[in-house]
Amino acid sequence: MFYLTMDILGTAAFAVSGVLVAMEKRLDLFGVVIIAFVTSIGGGTLRDLLIGNTPVIWMRDLTYVTTILITVFFSIIFANHLKYLRTSLFLFDTIGIGLYTMVGIEKGLQAGLLPVMCIALGTMTASFGGVIRDILCNEIPVIFRKEIYATACIAGGASYFLFVLLPIPDSYAFGAAILVVIVLRILAVRFGIRLPNIYKKET
């Protein structure tokens, strides 16, 4: 039940993120719904295909589709009350990647994958929906920019496997790893911490 709750919360957070991007791009209602859907289920769909969990989970459980539609409805209603659109987008996107990183890792563990593969699966689960969203909205995906994004997912995933070595419940380790992802992402943006560029400046 705990992991299902985290999955639903991640779905809702990414749906809000998708709605905000779509509205910023002035898409129509259909476009807003589609962007919310791909943002929420893109990473999970890739994850399920990679581990052979088909039909993918959102096709077998209407909870996810219902969650997205309800989230879209309320996001549209309250979007006009958000004073700082980009701040809200960043917040929900960050919460989403934290939750989805750990959901992906849990799915990897259930599939019997090695920890390093679980971390990779969690990172893809957290990032791929945003990649599709940004491509459809004619933006360079955040994961390919200099910002700390996938790196935060990897660090959070790695921290989970360290936390489970401690004498604490798995749910605490799960929650702590989510916080690691979120805090790292926030600190990186707050203090301008970025990965180095590999290209040379033109003279």
Image: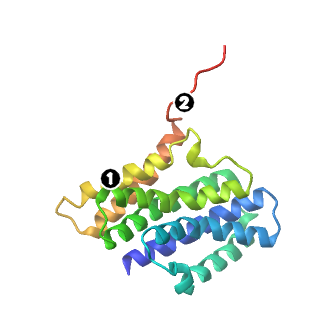
Q: Which residue does the numbered mark 2 point to in the structure image? A: 197
- Residue at mark 2 to residue at mark 1: CA–CA distance: 24 Å
The residue at the point 23 percent across, 61 percent down is 164
Quarter of the image for residue 66 reads bottom right
- Three-letter code, disc 2: Asn
The residue at the point 49 percent across, 71 percent down is 49
Residue 47: percent from left, percent from top:
47, 67
Residue 72: percent from left, percent from top:
68, 73
Residue 9: percent from left, percent from top:
50, 71
Q: Is residue 29 visible?
A: yes
Circle 1 sits in a helix, a strand or a loop, which is it? helix
The type of colouring in the image is rainbow
Quarter of the image for residue 174 reads bottom left
Q: Is residue 95 visible?
A: no
The residue at the point 34 percent across, 72 percent down is 111
| Count of numbered tags | 2
Q: Which residue does the numbered mark 1 point to in the structure image? A: 158
Dot 1 surroundings within 10 Å: few (below 14), some, or many (20 or more)? some
Q: Is residue 69 above or below residue 32?
A: below
